[in-house]
Image: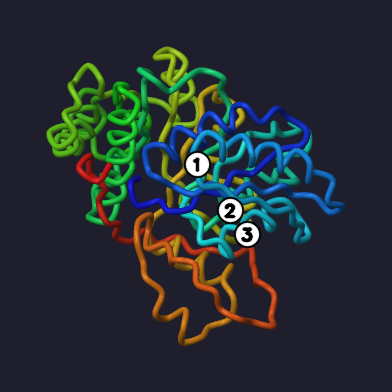
Amino acid sequence: MQTIRNTLVVMDAQQPDSLLLDRAMLIASATSSHLHLLACNKNNHSSSNLQATEDFLRQKGFGVSSQQAWKNSLHKTIIAVQQEQGCGLVIKQHSPDNPLLKTFLPSEDWKLLRFCPCPVLIVKSTDSWQGGVILAAIDAGNSDVNHRVLHAGIVGHGHDIAQMVGGTLHVISAHPCAELLSADPVYHLRDSIHAMYLEHCRALQAEYKVSDERLHIEEGPAESLIPSVAERLSVALIVIGSVARSGLSGALLGNTAENILDSLSADVLVLKPDDIISHLEELASPPHNQVLDGAIHSWPYSHAAHLEVPTTQPVGYMEQSGTTIGDRPRLTAANL
């Protein structure tokens, strides 16, 4: 996380800012990141609160700036400012969904996780990260090269954060019921399925020193298993990947990160694969020009550095995304 240069902190007029600021200051202290505060409203009603928060952070020794903005919706406003400011991380406090409406009207948090072209930290818990359990959630059943790279990224981020806060890294992967996994009887044994998933995790265990006691491979849907294990371990932060989808299936089904958001009590850091990030950045960025072609790319996920590029056209944004997982530069503890 050392290469995050600018962090976007989304202020919420309806909720206290203490949780957001605690997480923002922790990350900025570890990464020397500049903090950009954003109040999303139409009528500029947050100027006094923004100024007070900016003064407080500046007195603490942080580089900080702030603005108020509104671009049609909350998630579009956040993404537009994230692109304008070149932010490598977005921190936002969770806004609970209406259970009757979320199936038909996806929440702003749901849409932010899906379309934001950088990692998003959703703050939910009042518990400190210091000395806590960091849970990295992967899908070890997908063992192709691209998935292994994504898994290494998720576990690598979890490892680095655990090192940063003096915590303990755990890794979880859910596997389906043995009878549903394959028509071949050899795969009908739960022990065989567990052994296969375990074998796929061996390299990650060795690289990040995850003991068998801290590796959780269990049968069941990830949407229920991850919250259950997180509660059992009193997890402080869950690191998970998100692959954006398009079309009707994406609108109705979402993915694991989106589906479990309301059921978790811990904070959630959502990462995306390289090519998804690149595609979303193209959709969210200003029109193509030669100056942007020369932008310097750095972690996370080839995120383009912000350049002051004159343009007469507003930031574009489309709610479409791809599904292919691409390579991702690995982050190790040496970078923290």
The amino acid type found where label 3 is placed reads: Val
Secondary structure at numbered mark 1: loop
Could you tell whether 14 is left or right of 53 in the image?
A: right
Distance Cα–Cα, label 1 vs label 3:
20 Å
Residue on which disc 2 sits: 250
Could you tell whether 14 is left or right of 92 in the image?
A: right
| Vertical order, 149 against 305 (above or below) | above
- Locate the C terminus and report the quarter of the image it occupies: top left
Residue on which disc 1 sits: 62
| Vertical order, 164 against 323 (above or below) | above
The amino acid type found where label 2 is placed reads: Gly
Distance Cα–Cα, label 1 vs label 2:
39 Å
Residue 205 screen position, x and y as percent: 17, 32
Residue 98 screen position, x and y as percent: 76, 33
Q: How crowded is mark 3: few (under 14 residues within 10 Å), some or many (20 or more)?
A: many
Q: Which is more toward the observer, 69 or 280?
A: 69
Look at discs 1 and 3 and give the one toward the viewer.
1
Secondary structure at numbered mark 3: helix
Q: Is tag 1's residue or tag 3's residue first in the polypeptide sequence?
A: 1
Secondary structure at numbered mark 2: helix
Residue on which disc 3 sits: 81
Q: Which residue is drawn at 54% across and 63% down?
A: 321
Q: Residues within 10 Å of mark 1 (few under 14, many from 20)?
A: some
Q: How crowded is mark 2: few (under 14 residues within 10 Å), some or many (20 or more)?
A: some
Residue that sits furthest to the right in the current view: 43
Q: Is tag 2's residue or tag 3's residue first in the polypeptide sequence?
A: 3
Q: Which is more toward the observer, 282 or 83?
A: 83
Residue 326 screen position, x and y as percent: 33, 61
